[in-house]
Image (cartoon, grey):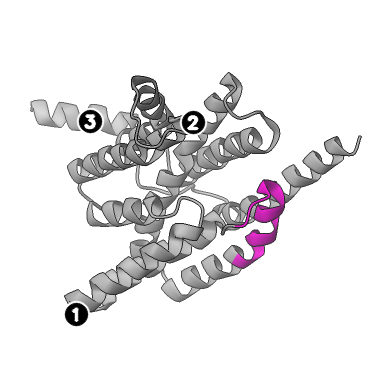
């Protein structure tokens, strides 16, 4: 009886569908990119907006793993990722001004890793190809971290406890990878300030975990499914291009 009551109360909390969480992820990504493009690194507002934006990548990796299993056509799914990875590259470079590959490229590599995990029978070949694809993300946004996140979510799919553990591991990995950013030019010097700052920076990942584990109902919107599907792909290159044009206009005033 107690278990049924807990299950019923838990069900009442599950008010967010997949599309709503993705819209939230798009918004937090926008805040992160505004910080990187317009604000001064290290200022309080920059740090807050940047950290809020860390909600997006783990949420996208989670839904990539879920979408890989649920999609009606993996060929079409993969093709869309290839298409928008190409379309997004120029806006990505214009907006940020550095030579690396965009997040959709990284998600494409994650998609291919899942294809390898599912379809390659030889354990040795499977491990080798997965490692090569993971290394291929080093030159991309959220390189190495995103493939690890995706595999953890894929392995934990359908199991609430494993999903919670997956988000916890993602948070720890992110903190370890991110702590060096706060070393002030002293690699390896793990000061209390750097560790505390890194712990705070990963709160967006924990927020994504809370949204998905406790509030996600496993459904999509009842209407506008096609619009949402293409909106999530188009938003990435379009918002980067708009931010670049705004930045250029401001600089030429």
Name which quarter of the figure residue 138 lies in.
Answer: bottom left
Give the answer, above or below, for where 159 lies relative to 195.
Answer: below
Which residue is depicted at the point 49% across and 40% down? 20
Name the element at disc 3: helix
Mark 1 or mark 2: whose residue is earlier in sequence = 2
The residue carrying mark 1 is 122
Residue 222 in the image, given as x and y percentages of width and height? 49, 48
* Alpha carbon distance from label 1 to label 2: 40 Å
Figure check: 90 above or below 7: below
Question: Is the stretch drawn in magenta largely helix, strand or loop?
Answer: helix
* Of callouts 3 and 2, the N-terminal one: 3
Q: Quadrant of residue 65?
A: bottom left
Range shown magenta:
86-99
Q: Which mark is residue 51?
A: 2
**How many other residues sit within 10 Å of disc 3, few (<14), some (14-19) or many (≥20)?**
few
Q: In percent of the image, x 19 and y 76: which residue is there?
A: 124
Q: Helix, strand or loop at disc 2?
A: helix
Q: Is residue 169 above or below residue 140?
A: above
Of 5 and 234, which appears nearest the observer? 234
Residues at discs 3 and 2 in contact (Cβ within 8 Å): no
Give the number of marks: 3
User: Considering the image in quadrants, where does the N terminus appear?
Assistant: top left
Q: Name the residue: 14% across, 31% down.
A: 4
Q: What is the spatial separation of the Cα atoms under label 3 and label 2, in whole angstroms?
A: 33 Å
Whole-angstrom CA distance, mark 3 to mark 1, is: 44 Å
Residue 130, x across and y down, in percent: 31, 68
Left or right of 145 on screen, residue 45: right
Mark whose residue sits in front, 3 or 1: 1
Q: Is residue 206 above or below residue 115?
A: above
């Amino acid at each position: 009886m107690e278990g049924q009551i807990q299950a019923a109360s838990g069900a009442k909390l599950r008010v967010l569908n997949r599309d709503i969480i993705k819209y939230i992820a798009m918004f937090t990504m926008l805040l992160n990119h505004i910080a990187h493009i317009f604000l001064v690194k290290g200022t309080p507002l920059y740090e807050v907006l940047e950290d809020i934006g860390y909600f997006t990548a783990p949420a996208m990796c989670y839904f990539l793993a879920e979408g890989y299993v649920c999609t009606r056509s993996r060929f079409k799914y993969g093709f869309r990722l290839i298409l928008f990875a190409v379309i997004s590259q120029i806006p990505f470079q214009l907006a940020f001004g550095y030579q690396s590959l965009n997040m959709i490229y990284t998600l494409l590599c994650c998609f291919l890793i899942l294809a390898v995990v599912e379809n390659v029978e030889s354990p040795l070949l499977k491990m080798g190809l997965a490692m090569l694809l993971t290394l291929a993300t080093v030159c991309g946004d959220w390189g190495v971290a995103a493939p690890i996140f995706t595999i953890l979510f894929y392995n934990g799919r359908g199991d609430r406890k494993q999903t919670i553990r997956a988000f916890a591991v993602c948070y720890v990995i992110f903190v370890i990878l991110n702590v060096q950013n706060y070393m002030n030019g002293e690699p390896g010097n793990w000061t209390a300030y750097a560790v505390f700052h890194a712990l705070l920076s990963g709160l967006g990942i924990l927020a994504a975990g809370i949204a998905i584990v406790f509030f996600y109902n496993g459904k999509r919107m009842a209407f506008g499914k096609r619009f949402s599907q293409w909106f999530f792909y188009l938003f990435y290159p379009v918002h980067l291009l708009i931010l670049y044009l705004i930045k250029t206009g401001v600089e030429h005033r």
